[in-house]
Image: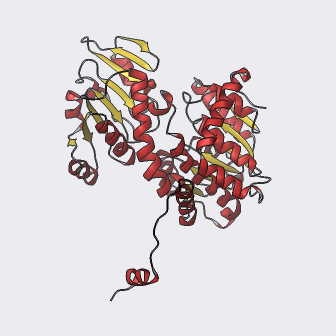
Amino acid sequence: MSTVRDVNLAPSGERKIEWAMSHMKVLTRLVKELTDEEPLRGLRIGMSLHLEAKTAALAIGLEELGADVSVTSSNPLTTQDDVAAALAGRISRVYAWRGETDEEYWENHRRVLADDPDIIVDDGADLSVMAHELEVAKDIIGATEETTTGVQRFKAMERDGVLKFPVIAVNDAKSKYLYDNRFGSGQSVLDGLMRSTNLMVGGKRIVILGFGWVGKGVAERLRGMGARVIITEVDPFRALEAYMDGYEVMPALDAARVGEVFVTCTGDIGVLTAEHFEIMKDGAILANAGHFDVEVDVRTLRRMAVEEREIRENVKEYLMPDGRRLYLLAEGRLVNIAAADGHPVEVMDLSFSTQLLSVVYLAHDAKGMEDRVYPVPLDLDERVVKTKLDVEGIKIDSLTDEQRRYLSSWH
């Protein structure tokens, strides 16, 4: 039995799902190619992903391949209630609604685990970590992970010897990080900033904290809109790369004094905290594009403020003791999906196609795998990208036999 906010919202959600699926040509083709085989028949799949139309398309595709699917949201603020209602009529079970309390969020994850999933599709590893805490991980065949943060958590579990099933790091696939993390984050973060604030990007000094694939994409798109972009980093290689790309590079404390908008892109904790809040300009805007709501130290910001109030949807004002005002977007959660629609449909088409193929791979090969983190098999990664090129009508060259011999020779 599904648990969603309002089943009457389903017609709106159906239209959103229809729109997404019509533009997810790679996923649609792969599902069609695999349907006759029913490679997931008899398997139960538990999903914890941002529950909106693209996620719905993946869940529907998994059921079309024979799976019994249970879904919850990986973020309390990113469920679209109309999509959840529509999806509840299309797959086995949905447990999610926008604005869940922390208790409701975890209870919905427990509901998914109570459905005894054989495979987990995770975003941030919350569902898989809970499976270990509840000691049901031993019954799980394996998991796939969508994000950098989640992969880091799984690798830490592997290092500490507590991981109880194999995990495929979908986030680390070329078809994921080169397109999703860079191009997807770049466009969707810009979308979230503009929707929530309705302010100009051009001319503003915008600080990007972290120059990984997400940070690169966000910086590139904001600069394209005319922003004066500043990069902060802890990695000397990435800092030099940002400098050679033409960005201004400085420590976060120096950037805190001059920035007008701050976007965290690290996946780490305490990136912006009290020492930064104390010196920021009046009117500074704070947003997170990394992962969990720990990059901007929201608890400290609340303790420091003498008053807080909601100015616009997804914009909260914090009045500091000296009269300065700081503005936090989307409660410090992912601005690109809490305040917008997340990555563009075509980008998630690639990411979720990689998820689909990785789930099918686990269904058939997990028994021979150890309890550790694995890369996406190269042939699956290439299949996704080649399918994308094909559906877009793009042709590329191939190496000749002579060229292959030359590249593999040493003399």
Q: Quadrant of the C terminus?
A: bottom left
The residue at 43%/29% (across/down) is 192
The number of discs equals 0
The image shows residue 283 at horizontal and vertical percentages of: 28, 18
The image shows residue 167 at horizontal and vertical percentages of: 58, 56
User: Is 128 on the left-hand or right-hand side of 205?
Assistant: right
The image shows residue 204 at horizontal and vertical percentages of: 25, 28
Quadrant in the picture for residue 265: top left
Residue 48 can be seen in this image: no
Residue 85 can be seen in this image: yes
Q: Quadrant of the N terminus?
A: top right
**In-front residue for pair 128/55:** 55
Above/below status of 59 relative to 360: above
Above/below status of 389 relative to 191: below
- Residue furthest out toward the bottom: 411
Quadrant in the picture for residue 321: top left
User: Is 241 on the left-hand or right-hand side of 290?
Assistant: left
**In-front residue for pair 48/187:** 187
The image shows residue 215 at horizontal and vertical percentages of: 35, 43
Q: How is the image coloured?
A: secondary structure
User: Is 53 on the left-hand or right-hand side of 208?
Assistant: right
